[in-house]
Amino acid sequence: MAEPGPPVLQLEGHRATLTLQRPQHGNRLHREDLRALHRHLQQVAANPELRVLVLAAGGRHFCTGFHLGELEEAKDSEAAGQDPQAFERLVDLLEALPLPTVARLQGGVYGGATDLALACDFRVGVRGMVLRMPAAGLGLHYYPSGLQRYVSRLGLNAAKRLFLLADTVDAGTLLQMGYLDRLVEAGALDAEVDALAAALAANAPLAVQGMKQSLNEIARGDADLPRLRQREARCAASADLAEGLAAWAAQRSPRFSGR
């Protein structure tokens, strides 16, 4: 087992995998982890060869959220409290990545980790996993962009249930409410994530990334029609569209270049 520490980034072909690695503590997130995740996401965003990111974690749990001990320390330390929005900015950065993202979920998903996974475009979970957002039980008012993400992606009623009741929710319910896109047995998790990541990476990058941005903007209610038309026009004039049409006519798999 690797030594516990900040998340690690692995690149393989068109895929990036970002792995949390504090399994002994439920992969809780420390401030140094937030800084490392921020750097890794910036690196991914700047790499035009990447077409999909998988967010994963080793061990029993996906993530138990932000380390509450450090949250308490922030009250007594001016240095620790210099960036109170660090977690919010990190999750917003993940959501804003141009390439599609997949969260690989197992065990427990708690606190801020629920929003970290929700910021991904797809979530694959295993039977037996659970989720809990304990903010109300801690006396914490969650940050605005996280609340908006819950409502825009899950709906108001589901967001109220998760935030105001602080329910522990099982995997079947998470699938029903749309938090999970796919639910599999534990032994099939990696294969399902790999298949989903491969399908995303195989499609035309300009179309996938453009439509991801447009769909997220529509869901948030801040879509701008001229901006959407620009993305539409860019794809219409792209080499990828020409390749896609040629491959369809020749009944072969397309070879997209992202141009």
Image: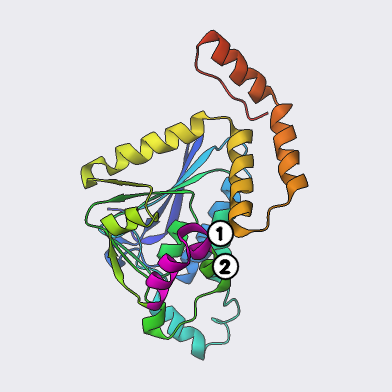
Please tell me whether mark 2 or mark 1 is closer to you in this view: 2
Question: Would you say 123 lies left or right of 227 here?
Answer: left
The local crowd at label 1, few if under 14, some if 14 to 19, many if 20 or more residues have their Cα within 10 Å, is some
Q: Amino acid at mark 2?
A: Ser
Q: Quadrant of the C terminus?
A: top right
- Separation of residues labelled 2 and 1 (CA atoms): 17 Å
Q: Which residues are magenta?
A: 149-164
Element assignment for label 1:
helix
Left or right: residue 163 versus residue 175 is right
Q: Is residue 81 above or below residue 87?
A: below
When the figure is inspected, residue 190 is found, relative to residue 38, above or below; the finding is: above
| Residue sitting nearer the eye, 55 or 77 | 55
Tell me, yes or no, if residue 202 can be seen here: yes
Q: Secondary structure at mark 2?
A: helix
On screen, residue 1 versus residue 218, left or right, reads left
259 above or below 172? above
Q: Quadrant of residue 194?
A: top left
Residue under pointer 1:
38
Q: Residue at x 22, y 56 (%)?
A: 128
Residue 237 rendering spot, x and y as whole percentages: 74, 26
Disc 2: CA contacts within 10 A as few (<14), some (14-19) or many (>=20): some
Q: Is residue 13 visible?
A: no
Colouring mode (rainbow / by chain / secondary structure / one colour): rainbow
Residue 69 image offset from top left, x and y in percent: 39, 81
Q: Quadrant of residue 192?
A: top left
The single residue placed furthest to the front in the displayed view is 157
Instruction: Residue 145: give its label.
Output: 2
**Label total for image:** 2
Q: Residue at x 49, y 46 (%)?
A: 101
Q: Main secondary structure of the magenta part?
A: helix
